[in-house]
Image: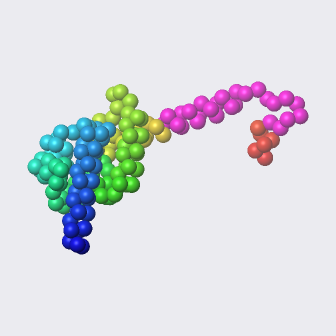
Amino acid sequence: MLQQEGDERIHRVKADVARRLRYVRQHHPEGPFTLAGLAERAGVSKRTLSQAESADGCNLTLETLLKVSHSLGISRDGYFLDEQVFEQVNSELAALDTLDAPGGPSKASPVAAPVDRLSGLIGEILASAAQAQSALRDLPAPPHGLPDRDDERR
């Protein structure tokens, strides 16, 4: 009985890993990737990835899972094993993908694109803050009897 439950759990985990691998390969902001493309990028065999995505899955090593996730710029080790981590990382990747502008950063490095996108976003936030600060300086003085901005700061 325990052996059967263990086997069923292993089968479910393999199916979950297969689903997550297919998903990230097809939906990653730098993808979609072919099996051969992702295998080359991660430094693993195409056959290993193909078997991992099959209905029965395969016995992937942690090393292989970490190579694949690292090659995609995913630093959360539980990505392929934990549904919550999987969903969080995918939300983060989707948010980064929406920041990607035409002619965006090079995709040569799996980490460069997200870092460049975040840097661009921070630059835009700082520029907007500077514009807002300048607009506030240009506002007319408040009517007599109301404190002005300098009085409020004291």
Q: Quadrant of residue 75?
A: bottom left
Residue visible at 40% across and 50% down in the picture: 88
Colouring style:
rainbow
Q: Is 86 colored magenta in this rendering?
A: no
Magenta range: 123-148
Residue visible at 36% across and 46% down in the picture: 90
Q: Quadrant of residue 33?
A: top left
Residue 9 point in image, percent of width and height: 26, 63
- In screen coordinates, is 69 left or right of 98? left
Residue visible at 32% across and 38% down in the picture: 29
Residue 134 point in image, percent of width and height: 64, 30
Residue 66 point in image, percent of width and height: 25, 56
Q: Is residue 9 visible?
A: yes
- In screen coordinates, is 125 left or right of 64? right
View extreme (bottom): residue: 2
- In screen coordinates, is 144 left or right of 139? right
View extreme (front): residue: 1
Residue 6 point in image, percent of width and height: 23, 68
Front-most of residues 85 and 99: 85
Q: Quadrant of residue 81?
A: bottom left
View extreme (right): residue: 145
Q: Is residue 49 visible?
A: no
Q: How many marks?
A: 0
Q: Is 147 colored magenta in this rendering?
A: yes
Front-most of residues 3 and 135: 3
| In the depicted structure, whether residue 62 falls above or below residue 124 | below
- The quarter in which the N terminus is drawn is bottom left
Front-most of residues 39 and 110: 39
Residue visible at 46% across and 37% down in the picture: 121
| In the depicted structure, whether residue 108 falls above or below residue 140 | below
